[in-house]
Image: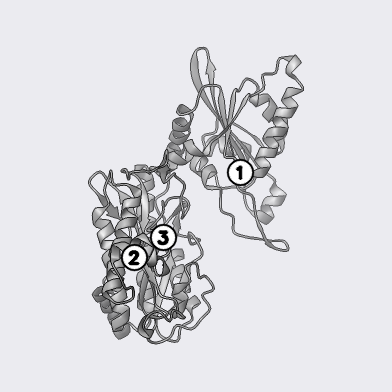
């Protein structure tokens, strides 16, 4: 099933916008991801580097893109160069077809293309006259080594008139700020990833039964993703039954789902490199117990309060503070925390039960790029940003400070939220969330 995707015209526009943000006589250097070995001669599924894909749409390994912004005849000229693996019919029999330098000129709108084998030879020539070299430092060690190698070889030719770049500049602040704000095409792709992810969770609710293994429920979600054109999930799925839901990054998914327990599922698909990220918590047998329902509705109340407040201009931290306030007050009402809610918030008492932030940026990476603070202050939400909203309550099974009925219950409710000019749009709204909706869906599934 074909899903929306980013056009090559948009990739080109991104390169133009990036170049416009940089000084003239500068060059951007972005390496691709490489194949990673799983074991012996078996490779893990390839996933392109997000920055590289954002600027190119090219999903082959062992490649390099250059974006130069030079003055020519008084005008700024952008040149896009792509180094990639050459065509090799013998290797392609084993590992699949390659675009090759010829193909990227046609299919990926490169101005120049070369074999990646020529990079070290050609880069000193291409860098001649460049004043500033931009790349993401601290993330691609080999690229840093190669840049220094290119510059070293250029310095030896200064007496021949070679002009060596004088500035190495961190690219991340510029590029990642661009990635934080989603275009119309990106939003459509993220709507698709959100909807497919949502329906995967619906399928899990419908198929859940006591006695299933956690990984069997995970399989139902992955099946749905693949049936709708998503080859891989956006991250390792969490399927935690009972006390396993209290482990925030539980991915073993190898225990039996027991009658009377809740199961927490945190899973999302990836559409054209854009992630969905949803968490739902529901009863294995289709019916919430009194204690489970009380905690679940408290988490839902916190999420609903945050969603109602989200709009352009609200500081990022304010949404988290809302969730902390609602959850702390609710825990006091349930007798799980004792004391004045404001004092409990000040001393961080709630963190024993709600230990993570409300959410994170979402995009090509599940925990996507983009600063949360500007000059030391929490930044305000703006249209085009996408974030998750995921309050939770987790009561450890060995927490003897609370009544036994609460122990071992872990609940999180997470949705993907686009900031709009008027407020926000929940991209994952089609998966049930209230107690009544969940129990009704699971009851109908059992009757079928």
The label shown at residue 138 is: 1
Q: For mark 1, give the secondary structure.
A: loop
**Quarter of the figure that contains the N terminus:** bottom left
- Seen in the picture, residue 158 relative to 255 is either above or below; the reply is above
Q: x, y percentage for residue 411?
A: 37, 72
Q: Is residue 290 left or right of residue 264?
A: left
Q: x, y percentage for residue 292?
A: 32, 79
- Seen in the picture, residue 107 relative to 241 is either above or below; the reply is above
Q: Is residue 342 left or right of residue 84?
A: left
Q: Is residue 433 visible?
A: no
**Viewer-side label of 2, 1:** 2
**Quarter of the figure that contains the C terminus:** bottom left
Q: Earlier in the sequence, mark 2 or mark 3?
A: 3
Q: Is residue 340 left or right of residue 158?
A: left
Camera-side residue: 364 or 370? 370
Q: Are marks 2 and 1 in contact (CB under 8 Å)?
A: no
- Give the distance between the C-alpha atoms of the residues marked 3 and 1, in whole angstroms: 27 Å
Q: Is residue 111 visible?
A: yes
The label shown at residue 277 is: 3
- Seen in the picture, residue 124 relative to 388 is either above or below; the reply is above
Residue that numbered label 2 is attached to: 344
**Viewer-side label of 2, 3:** 2
- Residue visible at 26% across and 66% down in the picture: 301
Q: x, y percentage for residue 44?
A: 62, 60
Disc 3 crowd, CA 10 A, few/some/many (<14, 14-19, 20+): many
- Give the distance between the C-alpha atoms of the residues marked 2 and 3, in whole angstroms: 31 Å
Disc 1 crowd, CA 10 A, few/some/many (<14, 14-19, 20+): few
Q: Are marks 3 and 1 in contact (CB under 8 Å)?
A: no
Disc 2 crowd, CA 10 A, few/some/many (<14, 14-19, 20+): some
Q: For mark 2, give the secondary structure.
A: helix
């Amino acid at each position: 099933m074909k899903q929306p995707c980013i056009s090559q015209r948009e990739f080109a526009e991104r390169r133009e916008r990036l170049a416009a943000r940089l000084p003239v006589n500068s060059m951007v250097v972005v390496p691709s991801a490489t194949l990673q070995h799983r074991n012996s001669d078996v490779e893990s599924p390839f996933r392109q580097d997000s920055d590289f894909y954002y600027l190119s749409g090219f999903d082959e390994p062992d490649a390099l893109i250059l974006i130069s912004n030079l003055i020519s005849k008084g005008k700024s000229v952008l040149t896009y160069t792509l180094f990639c693996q050459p065509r090799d019919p013998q290797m392609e029999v084993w590992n699949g077809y390659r675009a090759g330098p010829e193909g990227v000129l046609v299919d990926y709108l490169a101005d120049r293309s070369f074999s990646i084998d020529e990079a070290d030879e050609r880069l000193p020539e291409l860098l001649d006259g460049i004043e500033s070299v931009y790349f993401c430092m601290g993330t691609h060690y080999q690229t840093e080594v190669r840049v220094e190698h290119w510059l070293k070889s250029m310095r030896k030719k200064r007496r021949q008139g070679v002009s060596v770049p004088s500035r190495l500049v961190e690219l991340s602040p510029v590029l990642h700020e661009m990635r934080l704000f989603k275009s119309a095409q990106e939003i459509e792709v993220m709507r698709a990833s959100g909807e497919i992810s949502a329906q995967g969770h619906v399928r899990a609710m419908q198929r859940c039964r006591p006695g299933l293994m956690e990984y069997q429920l995970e399989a139902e979600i992955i099946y749905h993703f693949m049936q709708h054109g998503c080859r891989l999930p956006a991250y390792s799925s969490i399927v935690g039954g009972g006390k396993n839901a209290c482990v925030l990054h539980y991915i073993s998914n190898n225990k039996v789902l027991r009658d009377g327990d809740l199961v927490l599922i945190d899973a999302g698909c990836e559409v054209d490199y854009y992630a969905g990220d949803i968490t739902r918590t529901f009863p294995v047998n289709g019916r919430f117990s009194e204690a489970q329902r009380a905690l679940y509705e408290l988490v839902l109340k916190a999420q609903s309060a945050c969603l109602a407040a989200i709009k352009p201009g609200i500081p990022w931290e304010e949404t988290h503070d809302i969730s902390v306030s609602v959850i702390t007050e609710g825990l006091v009402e349930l007798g799980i925390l004792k004391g004045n809610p404001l004092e409990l918030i000040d001393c961080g008492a709630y963190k024993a039960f709600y230990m993570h932030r409300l959410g994170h940026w979402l995009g090509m990476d599940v925990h996507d790029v983009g600063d949360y603070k500007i000059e030391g202050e929490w930044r305000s939400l703006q249209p085009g940003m996408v974030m998750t909203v995921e309050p939770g309550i987790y009561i450890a099974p060995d927490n003897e400070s609370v009544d036994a009925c609460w122990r071992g219950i872990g609940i999180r409710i997470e949705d993907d939220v686009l900031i709009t000019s008027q407020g926000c749009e929940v991209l994952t709204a089609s998966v049930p969330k209230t107690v009544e909706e969940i129990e009704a869906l699971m009851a109908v599934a059992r009757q079928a």
